[in-house]
Image (cartoon, grey):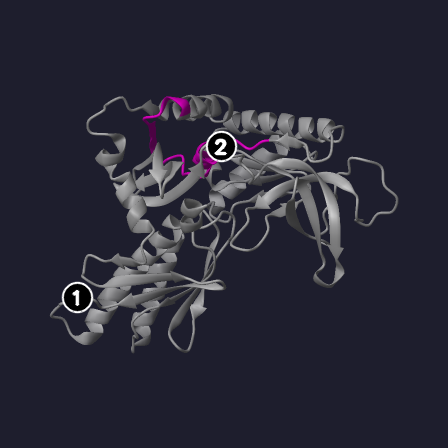
Amino acid sequence: MERNGRLFIIRQKIRGQERILSAYYEDKAAVELNCFGVGEEQLLGSIYIGKVKNIVKNIQAAFIEIGEGILCYYPVNQGEEPVYVKEKKGAKLAVGDELLVQVSRESVKTKAPTVTCNLSFPGKYLVLTTGKKQLGLSAKLSAEEKERLRALAKTLFTEEFGVIVRTNAAQAEEKALKEEYARLSRTAREILNTGIHQRCFSLVYQEPPGYAAGIRNLKKEQLLEVVTDDARIYEALKNYLAACQPEDLEKLRFYTETVPSLDSLYGLSRALEHALSERVWLKSGAYLVIQPTEALTVIDVNTGKYDGHKKPKETFLHINLEAAREAARQIRLRNLSGIILVDFIDLEEQESKELLMSVLSKALKEDPVKTVLVDMTPLGLVEITRKKVRRTLKEQASQ
């Protein structure tokens, strides 16, 4: 059963700073929250003319400057084919080289942003890449859809670019895929043809505002509305959708009521406040404690005020199953990434452990960001990994 999804975007004071809050709700519960600085340059996904400042051989990495004092980490020897701005001697990357790079990951804690020479241009259904000229299909697509889309790809796509077919392409019509491929390939050609003639540190391609670009990552069949009460945000969203996702333009709505405000009607600020707190209460009276550290994030499950009258074994299983669903929601909501350890209440029976892992696995699959349920350790800790792309919600709200 598909859930009803609504995306709310408002301008709000958060910890003394004016921010843009993006809140995605499914069936009246927040599942994704993001904060964006007003007027800040969208770094993630943008393409620059970078300059190699340093090469560190022992970690097989280079540091590339994309602007005044903005150094980015670049892993060398990934089989990428850099697009150089100036002619160079030799095939190896060298200090002083100027090349096209794209920010693939924001700075996370003390780590610098990461860049890649494999440029990518994401759409709602497809991602075009200048790297491997191959066809890739989302693992979340059904076998039938993979077969259909693979057949379509032979007639729609050329070998000029690599193409990744996203989960949202399920049931998409041939016309929609063809139009998006044409738009993305025009953009990619323009970047490659004009970028090499620009000055060092030039911004060659600017990603749309994060709150707008995030719409393409939401499941198309679940998204019912995109709602804002801010005129400037509304215009930015309208322009983005008209240019990149015209089929979703009719979902955009401008909220005009003054009482109640959009914030109070849907509890957006309250949802953010709860998502920034360490403790999360469950309906049963149990609670989670979520503690990010430098190396990993720990989620601890506690019985709290639970006063069920079941036997201890049944009580612990009941709490753990509720905690598993909520932990998965909180990981996505807070944009936790890297290594995540969940310390559930100890279960004695193997059958109960398998049920817990099954419920957690199903809940984690709702996350559009690649999330892997690794295993349960001999100590009963459940290991999860989640791809790092953006800063955590806590970092976003504090920047």
Residue 222, percent from left and from top: 35, 37
Mark 1 neighbour density, 10 Å: few (under 14) some (14–19) many (20 or more): some
Residue span colored magenta: 206-232
Q: Is residue 118 visible?
A: no
- Specify whether residue 375 is painted magenta: no
Q: Dot 2 lies on which element?
A: loop
Residue 97, percent from left and from top: 79, 43
Which kind of residue does numbered mark 1 sit on? Tyr
Residue 32, percent from left and from top: 37, 44
Which mark is first along the chain, 2 or 1?
2
Q: Dot 1 lies on which element?
A: loop
Q: Is residue 202 left or right of residue 289?
A: right
The residue at the far right in this view is 89
Question: What residue is shown at x 44% (from left), y 35% (from top)?
Answer: 211
Question: What residue is shown at x 50% (from left), y 64% (from top)?
Answer: 295
Which kind of residue does numbered mark 2 sit on? Pro
Residue 306: numbered disc: 1
> Disc 2 marks which residue?
209
Work out whether residue 161 or residue 70 is closer to the camera in this orientation and state it.
70
For residue 23, which quarter of the picture?
A: top left
- Specify whether residue 217 is painted magenta: yes
